[in-house]
Image (cartoon, rainbow, N blue to C red):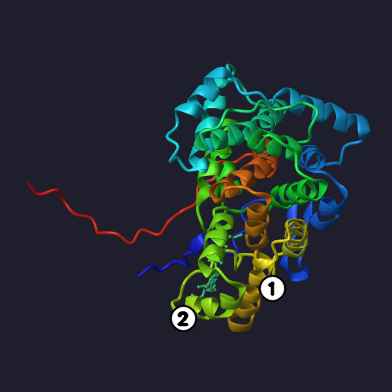
Amino acid sequence: MSKVNVNKGLEGAVIDTTSVSKVMPEINSLVYRGYPVQDLAENCNFEEVAYLLWNDDLPNASQLEEFTKKERSLRPLSKACLNVIKELPTTTHPMDAIRTAVSFIGCEDTEHWDYEGSDRKRERAMNLLAKIPTAIAAFYRHKMGKEYIEPKTDLSIAENFFHMCFGEVPNKDTIKAFDVSLILYAEHSFNASTFTTRVITSTTSDLYSAVTGGIGALKGPLHGGANEQVMHMMLEVGDPDKAKDWMLQALKDKRKVMGFGHRVYKKGDSRVPTMKKYAQLMADSTGEQKWMKMYDGLAETMIAEKNIYPNLDFPAGPAYYMMGFEIDFFTPIFVMSRITGWAAHIIEQAENNRIIRPLSEYIGHGERKVSK
Ligand code: COA
């Protein structure tokens, strides 16, 4: 038996300071650089929020223009990168595809191992902010057996992503709902994938390596992969009238129900009401009310039975489904947003670095000798 107090899952451990965001579960609030996320979602676009996370302030008009121009100019992938994506088996999970693409984009950066100060990190983060959506869409088209669609420079990140996936830009409501999801997914303090990027950065490794590791951490169903699992679960439930019984049975079977619970929020995730509002907007604009009815049935039962609340992945799953995305592309969409938060933390970690190296309590064999 261990004699020391083992901090399993690092619960409650404060391992560094940060100025990027603050989660305040007691008042159900999340702020990015001081701005409540709900305020940002209603009044800014994703590009402004990316600028805020990397520069500590919202951009003025000319700063936004310069930022947007740079981002749009970096969207195309090299022929070599496109070829790598086209060589991937179509059975590849899109998260593995985007992890591979990011790693390849890092290999194409010829100054890969040069000293990487904050300015260089910002440039590299911009390169990924611009190219990740192109890589996801390129893999989507490849998987569907369709021709690759070039990015456009006269569209926002959200609009251009739809254009590259589907060949058209949808109505304003869909774009707004998607843009809001990108803002809400952008940053969330020391979550598992962000912590991964900070650990990798703490060894003075480069931004591409840190982001590749972050994607690996985000893929898991206990973290970003939950938005995909939520939709698989809703398809399994099938009918809103079956939601209550389905949930009661799942709890009886001691199943972990995806899209519920959170390490930090115990009385609800501050991002949920905003995302739910935009998922409902998608339901109204597509006329498909079934998923939001099921949402209420599942959530009400879970809260009544276990006092466990939905997290952001719960409304995001059906919202993306109603926008027409394949389920296994939901977590890659999370990546095209979270690159902003990861990069902000990578820069912050590097600017005040100490290698992250916790301890463990050994519980294995006592000392023994090899006997041959
Ligand atoms: N479904 C069923 N029970 C859940 C649950 C869920 N989604 N989330 C938490 N619980 C239960 C746990 O089983 C545990 O019960 P117990 O005390 O009887 O063992 C209790 O609530 C405490 O939860 P715990 O597992 O300690 O929370 P955690 O902080 O370790 O894990 C999550 C947090 C997010 C990993 C966890 O809630 C989860 O797996 N959720 C589903 C995946 C998900 O939606 N992830 C996205 C997070 S944004």
Q: Where is 301 relative to 352, above or below?
A: below
Instruction: Residue 92 in the image: state x and y as whole percent.
Output: 45, 40
Q: Is residue 366 left or right of residue 195?
A: left
- The numbered disc on residue 252 is 2
Q: As displayed, is residue 70 above or below residue 181?
A: above
Which residue is depicted at the point 57% across and 26% down? Answer: 105
Q: Where ligand 1 lies, by image quadrant?
A: bottom right
Give the Cα distance between marks 1 and 2: 22 Å
Could you tell me residue 1's position as x and y percent?
Answer: 35, 70
Could you tell me which secondary element the residue under label 1 belongs to? Answer: loop
Earlier along the polypeptide chain: callout 1 or callout 2?
2
Asked if marks 1 and 2 touch (Cβ < 8 Å), the reply is no
Q: Amino acid at mark 1?
A: Lys
Q: Is residue 307 visible?
A: no
Question: As rendered, which of 42 and 290 lies closer to the eye?
Answer: 290
Residue 267 disc label: 1
The amino acid beneath tag 2 is: Lys
Judged left or right of residue 39, residue 282 is: left
Res. 186 visible in picture: yes
